[in-house]
Each structure stands twice: as structure tokens, then as C-alpha cells.
Image: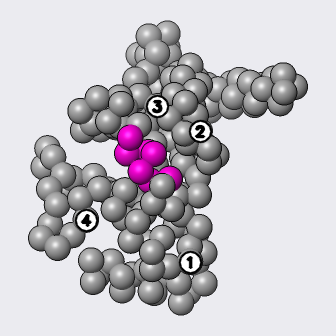
Amino acid sequence: TDELREVLNEIREAGVENVIALRGDPPVGEEKFVKTEGGLGNADELVELISAEYDFCIAGACYPETHPEAVSTEDDLAHAVDKVKNGASFLVTQLFFDNDAYFDYVERARAAGIEVPIIPGIMPIAGYEQIKRFTSMCGATLPADLMAQLEARKDDPEAITDLGVAYATLQCADLVDDVRGEVLRR
């Protein structure tokens, strides 16, 4: 944690005011994350350390489709609750391609007492192999119809990018429409 504090001190001195607290992935070739001696075991602890010692606006990550290492969806949501209790000002979701997963997650998070903003993590698909790798690492699923469209274009990188941008645009429009509808229902 001394190295971590050095980095946090450097970014504070550089004028950075906002940080996103992520535990990080296991090293390449490793299946599971292993806490180093004297290190932090998860992002909840990282948020707590930053909040206690620094005056950053802190974002935390959350997982509409459950973190791949979580024991259960309840356990995963409990980590998000802890991040907020420990000082996260808002949460940003892991990428997702089914907006219903996001809407369901927000509903569960609100029921669990999370009141901070939950920002949807939208990532346009830029490559066939890339998105397969990303989704396998983070536990996000590709809807069957989107996967079929990707498969049909897998040998045409430009078509994959065009589809990815179009899909993300429609996904964002749907999210915005839902937010507008929620505001109007109040």
C-alpha cells in the first residue's frame, strides 16, 4: 500500500481530482486474483483507503451481470454497497449489451440502499475477437441476436465496427428514453 499511496500522492499533486477505484484483473496467465502481502484484496478496501486519506471524488465499479469471481449476485451487490459506504460518490457499470440487465441491477441496487448515481458502461464493439475476449473476462453476455449479427460479419472488420457503433447508439437511446420516462413518471 506504500506504492499505492505514492501514486495517489503524485496524481493529487498533478491536480487530479477524480479517480475510479478498481482492484484490477489477475496478471496475464493467472486464473484468479491473489492479494499481495500487505496489499488490498478488493476495490471496497481501495475505496476505503482513498476516502480516508485523500480528497478525491471516487467512482467504483459495479456489475449488472455479476462479477465473475462473486459467489452470488447478492454477494456482488454487497460489494457495491460497501464501495458506497466506504466513500464512492458514484458507480460505473461493467460493459453490458442488454439494457434489461442494467435496469434490473439499478432496481436491486436501490432496494439495497444504494442512492448514488449508477452510470451505464457502454462500449461500442470494435472487433470480433476483442469483444469475445472482453466478455469472457468480465462475465458480460452478448444477446443471441447480436451474436448472430457479429458472427455473420466476423470476417469484415469494418462491418463489425459499424454494427458495434450502431448497436451502442441504439442502446444509449434506449437508456436515455428510460431516464426521461422515469423523470416524467415522478
Distance (Cα) linking label 2 and label 4: 26 Å
Q: Which mark is residue 162?
A: none
Q: Secondary structure at mark 3?
A: loop
Residue 67 vs 88, above or below: the answer is: above
**Callout 2 amino acid:** Pro
**Callout 4 amino acid:** Leu
Residue 95 vs 61, above or below: the answer is: above
Instruction: Give the magenta-colored segment's residue range.
Output: 78-84
**Callout 3 amino acid:** Pro
CA neighbours of label 4 inside 10 A, class few (<14), some (14 to 19), many (20+): some
Q: Which mark is residue 40?
A: 4
Q: Which residue matches tag 2?
A: 120
Disc with the residue nearer the chain's start (3 vs 2): 3
Where, by quadrant of the figure, is residue 113 drawn?
top right
Q: Which residue matches tag 1?
A: 55
Disc with the residue nearer the chain's start (1 vs 4): 4
Disc with the residue nearer the chain's start (2 vs 4): 4
Q: Secondary structure at mark 4?
A: loop
The answer to whether residue 9 is left or right of residue 129 is right
Residue 37 percent location from the top left of the image: 12, 70
CA neighbours of label 2 inside 10 A, class few (<14), some (14 to 19), many (20+): many
**Is residue 166 visible from the viewing direction of this image?**
no
